[in-house]
Image (spheres, coloured by chain):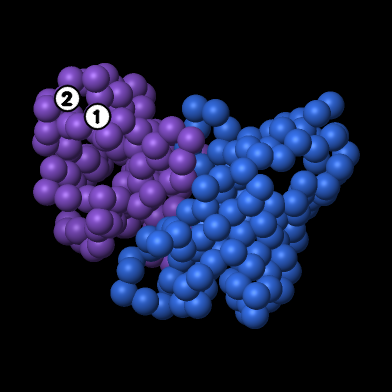
Amino acid sequence: EPEVTQTPSHQVTQMGQEVILRCVPISNHLYFYWYRQILGQKVEFLVSFYNNEISEKSEIFDDQFSVERPDGSNFTLKIRSTKLEDSAMYFCASSENRLHEQYFGPGTRLTVT
Amino acid sequence: QQQVKQSPQSLIVQKGGISIINCAYENTAFDYFPWYQQFPGKGPALLIAIRPDVSEKKEGRFTISFNKSAKQFSLHIMDSQPGDSATYFCAARNDRGSTLGRLYFGRGTQLTVWP
């Protein structure tokens, strides 16, 4: 069964450093999403991406964040200058279209020290 | 603003019992209500979903009950099994608006089923 994959599974970085989280969505999916989950809290929407551009972003997704689909398979989330409060589990998701089920990857645990 | 409120935060049920998790929403534009199941170290996986044109949907041991007037929906797990022990999230989405697929999640319920 096709699945969303994410790398790395765990990333430790120092405050102020840039990190790139990588995702490979399911191959025939057209809509891509990033969500995050701070430990013990709910899953929160960050951004949606369709047709090579951001469709919607939440108030969390400020200028420190960017997304990119650099080739036909990868979808990345970049955090330019990490802060302690960016420590969270980051989930990538994809769907065939916006009305369909979103399939989530296993997540990348980001720890900012 | 908390768009989707979920309770209880944690739930302990004996094997064979019924697990009930409740959610309430505020935005009447929501028209898709999924439940996700998450095991440790994994991403959320869709369990079952409902649209407001029906009041109940059943898939195996899992049932969603939906009350449009009260803006509430709940997940019932019949004959709960230890393998059901996981975190359950309710969510909501507006499929007719300008937001392209954004899911609003509840805070999650940690379900433990004792053997």
Q: Quadrant of the N terminus of chain B?
A: bottom left
* Horizontal and vertical percent position of residue A11: 28, 22
**Can the viewer see residue A71 in this picture?**
no
Q: Which chain is blue?
A: B
Q: For this rendering, which residue is in front, A26 or B26?
A: B26
* Horizontal and vertical percent position of residue B66: 68, 69
User: Dot 1: few (<14), some (14–19), or many (≥20) neighbours within 10 Å?
Assistant: some
* Residue type indicated by callout 2: Met
Q: What residue is shown at x 12% (from left), y 48% (from top)?
A: A63
Q: Which residue is mark 1?
A: A84
Please state the chain letter of the residue tagged with numbered disc 2 in the rendered image.
A
SS at mark 1 in the image: helix
Q: What residue is shown at x 35% (from left), y 52% (from top)?
A: A45
* Residue type indicated by callout 1: Leu
Q: Which residue is mark 2?
A: A15
Q: What residue is shown at x 22% (from left), y 40% (from top)?
A: A77
Tint of chain A: purple
User: Dot 2: few (<14), some (14–19), or many (≥20) neighbours within 10 Å?
Assistant: some
